[in-house]
Each structure stands twice: as C-alpha cells, then as structure tokens.
C-alpha cells in the first residue's frame, strides 16, 4: 500500500459491524485491523474481471474506518448509501473505488457472502429493467473474486500509457 488508513482497534471494527448489521468476512476484517484501507501502490492496483464482457480498472482508493475525510470513511459511506436505491443490495458494502469512481463491493451477507463484485456503471442497468432480477445476475455487476484476500492477491501493475493506447486500438 502506498498509504494506509488510520489505525483501528478490535472495538472499532466490532462497533462498525454492529452499525452495519452484519459481521465482516474474516479476511476483510483482518485487512481493516492491519491496513485499514488507503491507496495501493501502482504496482498492485489493476484488476480485471472475468468473462463475459471483461472489464478492468485501477483501484483508486480502499475506504477506511475512522477516516477524517467523510468521503473516504467506510462507516460514513455505508450509512449514507444504505438504501436499496443507492446500492444493488443491502447485502453489499462499498469497500473501494476504481479510477472511474465506480464501486467495488463486498458481499457481507447472503449466498455470495465474502465475494468481491464490481458495479460497472459504464454498462448501466436500464431504468425500465425488470426489478425482480437479482443483483448478482444484473449486467452491470461483475464478480471479481471469491474472497477479499483473493481479490487483493490478484491485483497487478497499472498499464503504461503506451499499453493503454495499444489496448484501445484493439
């Protein structure tokens, strides 16, 4: 990590879980206690989703508990966006943003608990879409990893400007 969030205690994380109404997956809980968000180094910030229609991006920031800036604070963001209209599901917690301000989400409850997902706002869900489609079946949601630890281990180096131009040309 290039920068880390402020140090937090077991009591801080437990209080967050209480306010959230869910216990956090063990690997993410450990991450908060040891690192607590921040900005990853350029050598470990790029993610790529699976098929179909792969998407990729760079992690801009991982949210932190007790961050002095509200927009970077995990609890502030979670409480502000705790409605179904703001998140695809109340089972999801926004844990990070990519370089396009799109959300990276951690499932904290339900059958997908522990998985990391990407909300692809470049391929948004149509306003008139069937409301009965489950969040994980939506075209704007892409699974990135089976666990937070797997997601973090999969991060790679950012592309150079030359690589980006080559990739855009196809």
Image: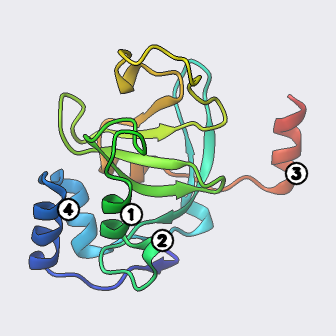
In depth, the one of 69 and 162 nearer the eye is 69
Where is residue 117 drawn, in percent x and y?
Answer: 41, 38
Res 122 → quadrant? top right
- CA gap between label 3 and label 1 equals 35 Å
**As drawn, is 83 to the left or to the right of 104?**
left
Looking at the rendering, which quadrant does residue 13 occupy? bottom left
Q: Which mark is on residue 71?
A: 2
Quickly name the residue at label 4: 29
Q: Could you tell me residue 68's position as x and y percent?
A: 41, 86
Q: Is residue 148 above or below residue 32?
A: above
Sequence-wise first label, 4 or 3: 4
Q: How far is the residue under mark 4 from the one under mark 3?
A: 38 Å
Q: Is residue 108 above or below residue 43?
A: above
Task: Give the spatial CA distance, label 2 vs label 4.
Answer: 20 Å
- Label 2 vs label 4, nearer the camera: 2
Decide which of tag 3 and tag 1 comes sooner along the chain: 1
Is 82 situated above or below 6?
A: above
Residue that mark 3 sits on:
162
């Amino acid at each position: 990590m290039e920068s880390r969030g402020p140090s937090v205690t077991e009591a801080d994380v437990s209080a967050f879980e209480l306010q959230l109404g869910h216990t956090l997956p063990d690997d993410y809980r450990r991450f908060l206690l040891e690192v607590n968000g921040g900005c990853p180094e350029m050598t470990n910030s790029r993610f790529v989703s699976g098929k179909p229609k792969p998407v990729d991006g760079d992690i801009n920031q991982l949210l932190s508990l007790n961050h002095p800036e509200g927009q970077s604070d995990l609890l502030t963001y979670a409480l502000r966006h705790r409605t179904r209209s703001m998140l695809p599901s109340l089972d999801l917690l926004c844990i990070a943003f990519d370089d396009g301000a799109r959300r990276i989400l951690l499932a904290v409850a339900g059958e997908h608990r522990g998985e990391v997902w990407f909300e692809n706002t470049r391929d948004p869900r149509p306003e008139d879409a069937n409301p009965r489609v489950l969040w994980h079946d939506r075209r704007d949601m892409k699974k990135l990893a089976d666990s937070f630890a797997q997601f973090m281990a999969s991060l790679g180096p950012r592309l150079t400007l030359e690589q980006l131009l080559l990739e855009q040309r196809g």
